[in-house]
Amino acid sequence: MTDIHAHVVPTVDDGSKSLEDSLSLLKKAEKEGINRMVCTPHFRRGVYEATRANIEKAFNTLVENNPTGVELFLGREITIDKGVYKALKDGELSTMAGSKYVLCEYPYTKFFDIAGSVYELKLAGFKPIIAHIERYEYLSADDVADIRSLSAVIQANASSFFASPFASHRRRAYNYLENDFVDVVSSDIHVTREYNMKRARDFIKKRYGEEKAEKLFKTNADKILL
């Protein structure tokens, strides 16, 4: 499997407090069946603002000490605000594995014009990936269909199908999956969470077949890394 949403770079956000935490997460990833991973530290203004240089240094340390066969790439999960468009153009924020893809996060409960943001990012030459689509309470299924029609990639968290404490997240995750709105399923792993990737893949394979499971957990994610 290829995981494009993972908080495993040590000490740069809330994902991993130490190199030891990060190495443990990589070992668990390998056991889970993940063989490629995009490491996506948070950027959230006023909260997680580690510089690109500091993140790259921590990422390189992780790569040098990686005890597994999991192939690592660097990205960023970016909470979108008015300032990020320029920061992306100026190279201050990492895209996904050096591509034009950008993993985008938005407010969960307060309305944000996600479709407008997708349009702005595309105008700037980027390809938006909408992180954990099931978390945005103000989006309807029609809204998600509209966002996807703008060629945004829709990502859902594996744990939302089973382990989310929020029933609304589970309900929306199943709804979007049933309606073929989800392009990629990822872990959004933090040291305080479980991967649930194998469990989610097995469920989707049983319910929808191997072809769909392979697209959601491997094929579509790998396209981002081309």
Image (spheres, helix red, strand yellow):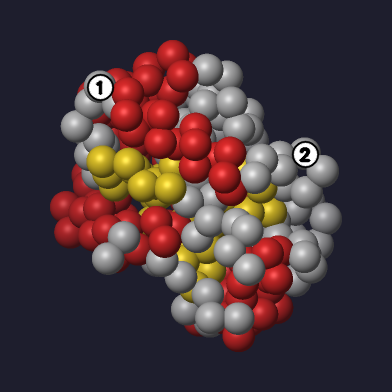
Asked if residue 156 can be seen in this view, the reply is no
Q: Which residue is drawn at 69% across and 54% down?
A: 79
Q: Which residue lies furthest to the left in this view?
A: 210
What's the distance in space between the residues labelled 1 and 2, CA to CA?
Answer: 31 Å
Q: Quadrant of residue 31?
A: top left
Residue type at mark 2?
Val
Going from the N terminus, do you reach mark 1 or mark 2 first?
Answer: 2
Q: Name the residue under label 2.
A: 47
Q: Residue at x 60, y 57 (%)?
A: 93
Residue type at mark 1?
Pro
Count of picture labels: 2
Q: Nearer the viewer, residue 3 or 19?
A: 19
Q: Residues within 10 Å of mark 1 (few under 14, many from 20)?
A: few
Q: Quadrant of residue 158?
A: top left
Q: Which of 66 and 185 is in front in this view?
A: 66
Name the disc covering residue 9, or none.
none
**From the viewer's perspective, is 67 left or right of 145?**
left
x and y percent of residue 220 in the render? 30, 62
x and y percent of residue 17 in the render? 57, 19
Cβ atoms under marks 1 and 2 closer than 8 Å: no
Q: How crowded is mark 2: few (under 14 residues within 10 Å), some or many (20 or more)?
A: few
Q: Is residue 31 above or below residue 36?
A: above
Q: Is residue 57 above or below residue 171?
A: above
**From the viewer's perspective, is 62 left or right of 192?**
left
**From the viewer's perspective, is 69 left or right of 79?**
left
Q: Residue at x 17, y 59 (%)?
A: 211
Q: What element carries label 2?
A: loop
Q: Which of 46 and 157 is in front in this view?
A: 46
Image quarter hosting the N terminus: top left
Q: Which residue lies furthest to the bottom in this view?
A: 123
Q: Name the residue under label 1.
A: 67
Q: What element carries label 1?
A: loop
